[in-house]
């Protein structure tokens, strides 16, 4: 019998994502994604880079971390294979699948007629989903409930946040993550590394900024957690 990751001739890629903030909001933050490994030990290396990645910043919010993780997971997995993203963040899932439709109609204003927070990240997530040939499905998982994938990315995101706080690692966010953070009320005191400043100033491209950044962690193949809920992107 074929593994569950195989569907109608395509390899289904399943990725866990998570964000972390120490002292949320405005503590050190982290984000991470990690591929699930199938029964044969494969991370389904079909047109994507690495099998895990993580980043963070000295300041931020859990929501920015969650959205960065989803965006980076999408960008790391282009192609025609169906992609399932597991997240414990109802906020990130609703941004990508539900609320975004109203925000688009309302000129990226919320119900209070105020600008949508983290709009740069949410727009980028929407663009990645729309241009991806393969389908994208989001699955909610209960956090800190023994789901192996969720536990792995929680560890990666939290560790990066801790390393940023202790100055062991420089901040690392996608361009849209830096823009969302800098435009937020939590930007005071944030340490923006030199390469990120060059990215923001247009002196280097996103591809140059990302070179060599994949963590490449091998992760546990048993990622069948409980308490999940699926959300299809319409």
Image (cartoon, helix red, strand yellow):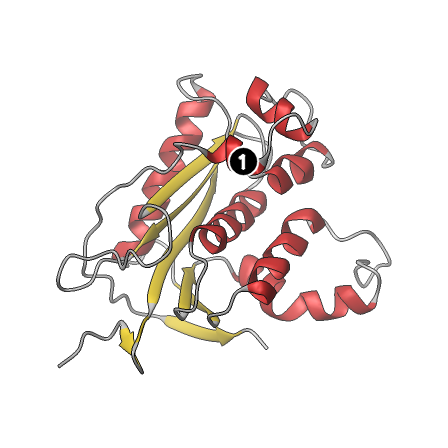
On-image quarter of the N terminus: bottom left
- Is 21 located above or below residue 128 in the figure? above
Question: Which residue bears the numbered disc 1?
Answer: 173
- Is 54 located above or below residue 40 in the figure? above
- Is 2 located above or below residue 175 in the figure? below
* Image label count: 1
Dividing the picture into quadrants, the one containing residue 166 is: top left
The x, y position of residue 177, in whole percent, is 61, 40
The x, y position of residue 19, in whole percent, is 47, 45
Q: Along the horizontal axis of the image, is 5 left or right of 129?
A: left
Q: Along the horizontal axis of the image, is 226 left or right of 142?
A: left
Residue found at x 84% / y 65%: 106
The x, y position of residue 115, in whole percent, is 81, 51
- Is 199 located above or below residue 73 in the figure? above
Q: Along the horizontal axis of the image, is 194 left or right of 33?
A: right
Q: Is residue 22 visible?
A: no
Residue found at x 52% / y 32%: 208
The x, y position of residue 38, in whole percent, is 20, 63
Q: Secondary structure at mark 1?
A: loop
Which of the pair 223/144 is nearer the observer? 223
Residue found at x 53% / y 25%: 58
Which of the pair 14/165 is nearer the observer? 14
On-image quarter of the C terminus: bottom right
Dividing the picture into quadrants, the one containing residue 147 is: bottom left
Residue found at x 55% / y 50%: 67
């Amino acid at each position: 019998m074929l593994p569950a990751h195989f569907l109608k001739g395509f390899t289904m890629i399943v990725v866990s994502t998570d964000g972390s903030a120490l002292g949320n909001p405005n503590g050190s933050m982290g984000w991470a994604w990690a591929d699930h490994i199938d029964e044969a030990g494969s991370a389904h290396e079909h047109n994507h880079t690495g099998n895990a990645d993580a980043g963070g910043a000295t300041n931020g919010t859990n929501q920015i971390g969650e959205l960065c993780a989803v965006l980076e997971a999408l960008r790391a997995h282009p192609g025609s294979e169906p992609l399932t993203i597991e997240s414990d963040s109802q906020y990130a899932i609703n941004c990508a699948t539900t609320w975004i439709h109203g925000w688009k109609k309302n000129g990226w204003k919320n119900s209070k007629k105020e600008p949508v927070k983290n709009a740069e990240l949410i727009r980028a997530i929407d663009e990645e989903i729309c241009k991806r040939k393969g389908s994208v499905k989001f699955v909610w998982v209960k956090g800190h409930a023994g789901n192996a994938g969720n536990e792995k990315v929680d560890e990666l995101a939290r560790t990066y946040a801790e390393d940023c706080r202790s100055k062991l690692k420089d901040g690392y966010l996608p361009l849209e993550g830096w823009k969302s953070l800098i435009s937020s009320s939590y930007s005071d005191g944030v340490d923006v590394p030199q390469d990120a400043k060059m990215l923001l100033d247009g002196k280097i491209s996103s591809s140059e900024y990302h070179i060599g950044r994949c963590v490449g962690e091998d992760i546990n193949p048993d990622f069948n957690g409980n308490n999940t809920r699926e959300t299809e992107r319409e």
